């Protein structure tokens, strides 16, 4: 195929036309505008209904724990284990919905009114976008695994604590490592939306460095908790500090991903963006569940973990909606074109508005020192436009 170039505007218009035709074959009443989240919600699988029902059941469990603490104080750690395991079960249902949701119809430019070269160019762009989406969804599915093992480990810690098992000081390191893995995966999703990762040689240096950083933080926490393992008071403080740092890292990664979702190219509803911002802010509040103060701090911790579940539900709905309605495909096609074009356009715009550079007036001729050897060392001072300079070169003087 010959090297054929197509303007980003024309390419985008053609892909939008293909997407609209593809959506009309599945979703009725969306021939003018892409389906909103409410319209898309009518065509989702039953796993999403089950997921929302599980979220409500978890909320009821939290309400019982918060408003009837005297009835369960004797089995405090056991009820904490049930909380975490219930959260893990909800996470499993959310993951099942993410993999069983209806796959959007494939975008095919064959029926498009365009030249053969244009169709080949569009097909190439769609193939690159599909590969980028597969990478993005790969990180997204790993997030659910990280969440599941996080709440599973927290539940095991609470369960063994209820049985009076000792030597559980390393469990906090495991839970913080899993939470840091979630931050790593959120950053990977953000990176997939921010940089062009398709058709580029990537030796994996960035991911290797981030992985080494995760295990370095985990090794440091393990060493510090091992040192204070005999002092219960100091051990609680150490756990709180490392858990707070882990929450801050996860909050930053979630905020970066939310910034990408707020792009006008995707056009995620502002209410969903607000929920995700709240999710980023409350990440450092989760360690309050394990503090020694079981009144206000514990209440804030339970409230934060309950809110986080509905924030996960919002994130799940947003990503699956973006994928099913080809908004993610549009972003993967449009964003690289914008990145490629905006740099030169910005430079031209700025240079065009800058004041003209002042012309420099011709200054006096430059003076230079030249050495002439005629039996003894002498120094002659000449200028660049001195007529005697040629005589110096031939040795007339």
Image (cartoon, helix red, strand yellow):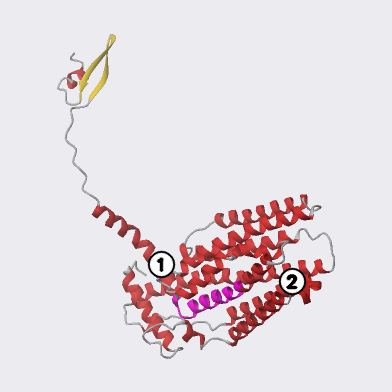
Start-end of magenta stretch: 307-327
**Residue at the location (20% across, 42% down)?**
358
Q: Tag 2, which secondary structure?
A: helix
**Residue at the location (66% across, 82% down)?**
57
Would you name the residue on which mark 2 appears?
A: 80
The quadrant the N terminus occupies is: bottom left
Can residue 78 be seen here? The reply is no
**Residue at the location (47% across, 70% down)?**
261
Q: Residue furthest top?
A: 375
Q: Is residue 285 above or below residue 40?
A: above
Is residue 320 in the magenta section? yes
Q: Earlier in the sequence, mark 2 or mark 1?
A: 2
Q: Write down the quadrant of residue 79 in the picture.
A: bottom right
Q: Write down the quadrant of residue 374 in the picture.
A: top left
Is residue 201 in the magenta section? no
Q: Residues within 10 Å of mark 1 (few under 14, many from 20)?
A: some
Q: Write down the quadrant of residue 252 in the picture.
A: bottom right
């Amino acid at each position: 195929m010959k090297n054929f170039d197509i303007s980003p505007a024309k390419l985008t218009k053609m892909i939008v036309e293909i997407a609209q035709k593809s959506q009309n074959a599945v979703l009725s009443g969306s021939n003018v505008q892409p389906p909103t989240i409410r319209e898309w919600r009518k065509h989702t699988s039953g796993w999403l209904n089950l997921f929302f029902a599980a979220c409500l059941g978890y909320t009821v469990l939290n309400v019982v724990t918060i408003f009837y603490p005297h009835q369960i104080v004797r089995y405090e750690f056991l009820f904490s284990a049930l909380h975490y395991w219930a959260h893990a079960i909800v996470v499993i249902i959310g993951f099942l919905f993410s993999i069983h949701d209806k796959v959007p119809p494939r975008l095919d430019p064959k029926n498009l009114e365009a030249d053969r070269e244009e169709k080949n160019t569009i097909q190439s762009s769609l193939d690159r976008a599909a590969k980028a989406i597969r990478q993005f969804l790969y990180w997204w599915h790993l997030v659910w695994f990280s969440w599941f093992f996080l709440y599973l480990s927290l539940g095991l810690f609470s369960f063994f604590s209820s049985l009076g098992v000792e030597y559980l000081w390393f469990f906090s390191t495991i839970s913080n490592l899993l939470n840091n893995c979630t931050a790593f995966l959120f950053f990977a999703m953000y990176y997939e939306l921010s940089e062009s990762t398709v058709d580029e040689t990537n030796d994996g240096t960035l991911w290797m460095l981030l992985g080494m950083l995760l295990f370095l933080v985990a090794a440091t926490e393990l060493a510090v908790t091992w040192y204070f393992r005999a002092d219960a008071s100091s051990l609680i403080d150490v756990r709180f500090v490392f858990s707070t740092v882990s929450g801050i890292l996860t909050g930053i990664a979630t905020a970066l991903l939310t910034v990408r979702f707020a792009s006008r190219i995707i056009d995620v509803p502002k209410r969903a963006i607000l929920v995700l911002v709240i999710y980023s802010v409350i990440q450092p509040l989760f360690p309050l569940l394990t503090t020694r103060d079981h009144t206000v701090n514990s209440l804030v911790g339970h409230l934060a973990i309950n809110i986080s579940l509905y924030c996960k539900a919002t994130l799940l709905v947003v990503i699956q909606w973006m994928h099913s309605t080809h908004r993610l495909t549009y972003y993967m096609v449009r964003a690289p074109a914008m990145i490629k074009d905006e740099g030169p356009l910005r430079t031209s715009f700025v240079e065009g508005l800058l004041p003209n550079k002042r012309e420099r007036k011709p200054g006096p001729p430059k003076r230079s020192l030249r050495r002439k050897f005629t039996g003894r060392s002498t120094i002659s001072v000449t200028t660049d436009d001195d007529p005697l300079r040629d005589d110096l070169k031939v040795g007339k003087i």
